[in-house]
Image (spheres, rainbow, N blue to C red):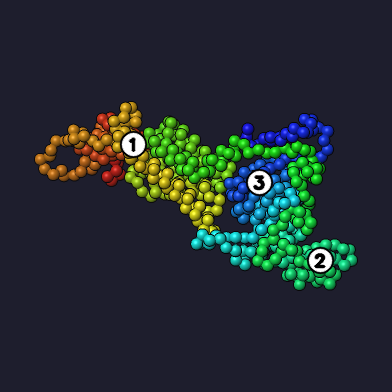
Amino acid sequence: MLSSGFAQQVDPQDPADDADRPGGRAVMIELEGVITPLSGAIWQRKFEQAQQQNVDTIILRIDSPGGYLSTTLELVDMLQRADEVRTVAYIDQEAISGAALTALAADEIFLAADARFGDAGLIVEGDDSAFRYADAKARSILVAQVRTIAETAGRPPALAEAMVDKDSVVFEATHKEDGRRAFFTEDEWVSRKDADQWNRGKPVFESKKNRFLTLSGRRAAELGLANGNAASPRELAEAIGVQYPVEKMETGVLDTTVVILNNPLVTGLLLIVGLGALLFELSAPGISIGGILSTLCFGAFFWSRFLGGTAGWLEVLLFLLGLAFIAMEIFVIPGFGIAGISGIGMLVVSLVMASRHVLVPESARDLEQLGVSVVTVLAAMAVCAVLLLAFMSFSQNLPGPLGRIALEPPTAEELSFAPAAAVPQEPGWAKIQEGDLGRTLSALRPSGKAQFGEDPVDVVTEGDFVDPDQPIRVVKRSGTRVVVRPV
């Protein structure tokens, strides 16, 4: 079953008929594991599919230690833009780092009493591969973003700030007139013009110097950072007033396939088979098994990258341009020069870009992953080159068209011609005129040797492949370049 469908969880203690149960319809999406560009793209696709089902509530069951900040902010933006549906974050284990920031953007938050929530400090990996606290500039930007996320969702921004800034100490204050409760950092308190209208209380126990704010589910509800506690999905459904059991978007064949195809080993295998089939197709033009297999391999590669959130149409365009340049070099321009090198370069760049969420490395981890992508592509090309050379070394002995892939050297008989009494006055190509007839001495693929009278001449076709001992006609001569066409 594909992931676009819903699989309903069945509770044997509940009656089968849910039609009379109160509450709106809700679906649950599980956000489990590290937040990566790949997992983030899968979750966003599920969220869009849930919105298309016209449900009343989307529940995000979060159990994650966090991950990429860029992907986290994409998930936050996804929740903030979901104005037509109610979003509820449910944390029964932990929501740490980026997962906590994602939960803050939901309309409502419910946690199990012993769940962990917070510890969202910005940690970066240095050039020595050691993790350390981000610099003040990066922290200040993230603090501003997190405060905005909390304020938009109606949550205390000071508590949210303390999750990402280990130097923020938060205390509680009560308004002298209406008894409102609020939380402030020291900097906020000093800058408030109405500070004299508030009674300053004690600091929040979990908010201390050199410690990122981390709360239990019970404590988060007490401080107003969460809407309440729920020990199970049943309690959650009762608390938010939706039907139970809650429909759950299962991880299906589509998501599993995307994850498998994005594995570096599987990627390398796809590229090896795809490039090998492409070389086979170029050696014998026409829609054959090579062209079909190459299309399937590269189609699967780019399809998985599209769904994985790392590829777009730019990468596909670069790939197709690279193929066009290589084909031009083989069939139009004799030799191997700028067009061929440029085509190979575009192929490498397109394949690497399609495997990357961030092209320019921003950390040691990004640099390492870029290296993995580059090595995977280059290794696949190197393996194809070795296999091609090995294949061509014995393909002459194979029956049928496979034996014609390798270019056999012309025999002595083919190259023999009557010895001249003296050194020729002019080379053979100089005697050639447009319209002259001759015969091929070797296979033209598309260049090779042909016999005109007593002179062997280097010739090139207009792109056609011609077997040895075939009649040809000269259609153009420009300097030493003689263009022929089969008769």
Q: Is residue 349 left or right of residue 484?
A: right
Tell me the residue that label 1 is attached to: 391
- Amino acid type assigned to the residue bearing label 3 in the image: Leu
Inter-mark Cα distance, 2 to 1: 79 Å
- Amino acid type assigned to the residue bearing label 2 in the image: Ala
In the rendered image, the vertical position of residue 375 relative to residue 136, given as above or below: above
Tell me the residue that label 3 is attached to: 31
Residues packed near mark 1 inside 10 Å, few (<14), some (14 to 19) or many (20 plus)? some
Query: Who comes first in sequence, dot 2 or dot 1?
Result: 2
Q: Is residue 10 left or right of residue 297?
A: right
Give the residue at x 85% y 62%. 180
- The C terminus - image quarter: top left
Element carrying mark 2: strand
Q: Residue 100: which quarter of the image? A: bottom right
In the rendered image, the vertical position of residue 202 relative to residue 451, given as above or below: below
- The N terminus - image quarter: top right
Q: Is residue 76 at least partly visible in the picture?
A: no
Element carrying mark 1: helix
Among all residues in the image, which is located at the extreme top? 400
Q: Is residue 354 left or right of residue 478?
A: right
